[in-house]
Amino acid sequence: MKRSAPARPALAAKGSARPHAHPRARRGFDVRWPLPRGSGFAAVLILFAASIGYGVHKGDHASSLMGGLREMRDGLGNAAGFRIAAVSLSGNKQVTREEIFSAAGISDSASALFFDVEGARARIKALPWVADATVRKLLPDRLDITVTERNAFALWQRDGKVSVIAADGSVVSAQPDRSFAALPFVVGRGAEKKAQAFIGLLDRYPAIRDQVRASILVAERRWNLRLVNGIDVRLPETDVERALQTLAELDSGKKLLTRDIVIVDLRIADRVAVRLSEAAAQARDEAMKDRKQKRKGGDA
């Protein structure tokens, strides 16, 4: 049997195109990533923006840059007719109009179109006197602001400095004037936080309250009363109402607080200790001596 010769590979015809292999094709893969049109320009912009951002960060110019952008934005809004032309403000007594405008960020160049009402409200509420605030935009060119102020509750002294406090103990003014002179006066560390509860208790005994010049918190635990006539009343740490009731009864029945004494100590339950003034103590000692001498003379 005649064997057929093995098939020989077909040769390309003369002059026909022969496939041209990529150099990396021999290693098993072929990667081709065509770049989109304009990618070079975009890369330049990204590099430029990154350079500006790095320079702003290193040079601490972020606030200046943002301020400039805000001015540019407001300028565009104002050119379109949204410049703030009128502001309605109500509810303020202690806080001035200028303080509120400054906190809110209202200026001659501010634009109502881009005005941040929530940010303005938060900054106004941060003012010590302000308990709450509402801010509304009335486009194209008006703002409406209403504030609710805290009430002055007491004067608080600590480390020789006197401040006006609200009922919750927050300091609303560090420079009180004479208009606050009639407020209750509390002294000591922590007194601002406990003043509301204690003064509320003291108000139940107006005959005592009206004689109090200052309420002094001792070691953040208990109160002493300094009366207008100089008498110190030492109250207990607990059951303060019972002590005030006892003091009111003694003053009403025996005029205790008009006597020549310097201290009334109510810290021990069911016991009242009184310290006389030096003059009263000396007079009492002399009276006791006279009595003893009279007794000796009578015995003779």
Image: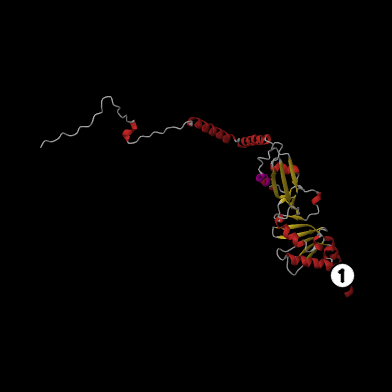
* Residue 77 sits inside the magenta stretch: no
Query: Is residue 113 shown above or below 196?
Result: above
Which residue is painted at 33% across and 30% down in the image?
23
Residue 238: image x %, image y %?
70, 65
* Magenta stretch prevailing secondary structure: helix
Q: Is residue 300 visible?
A: no
Residue 115: quarter of image:
top right
Q: How many marks?
A: 1
Q: Position of residue 2 (x, y in %)?
A: 11, 35
Image height of 43 relative to 173, above or below = above
Q: Where is residue 250 in the image (x, y as percent from the top left)?
A: 81, 67
Give residue 61's quadrant in the image. top right
Residue 177 at x, y percent in the picture: 79, 48
Q: Foreground residue, 109 or 167?
A: 109
**What span is in magenta?**
117-121
Q: Does the magenta stretch include residue 118?
A: yes
Q: Which amino acid does label 1 sit on?
A: Arg
Q: Which quadrant of the rendered structure holds the C terminus?
A: bottom right
Which residue is the extreme one toward the left? 1
Q: Nearer the viewer, residue 170 or 48?
A: 48
Of residue 33 and residue 253, the one placed in the foreground of this image is 33
**What secondary structure is marked by label 1?**
helix
Above/below status of 267 relative to 214: below
Task: For label 1, count other residues whose C-alpha is less than 10 Å away and answer few (under 14), some (14-19) or many (20+).
Answer: few
Task: Tell me the quarter of the picture where residue 81 sits.
Answer: top right
Q: Looking at the image, which residue sits at the far top?
A: 15
**What residue is shown with label 1?**
291
Using residue 1 as the reference point, say whether residue 266 is left or right of it.
right
In the image: residue 230, left or right of residue 107: right
Judge left or right: residue 14 versus residue 143.
left
Rendered-image quadrant of the N terminus: top left
Q: Is residue 199 at least partly visible in the picture?
A: yes
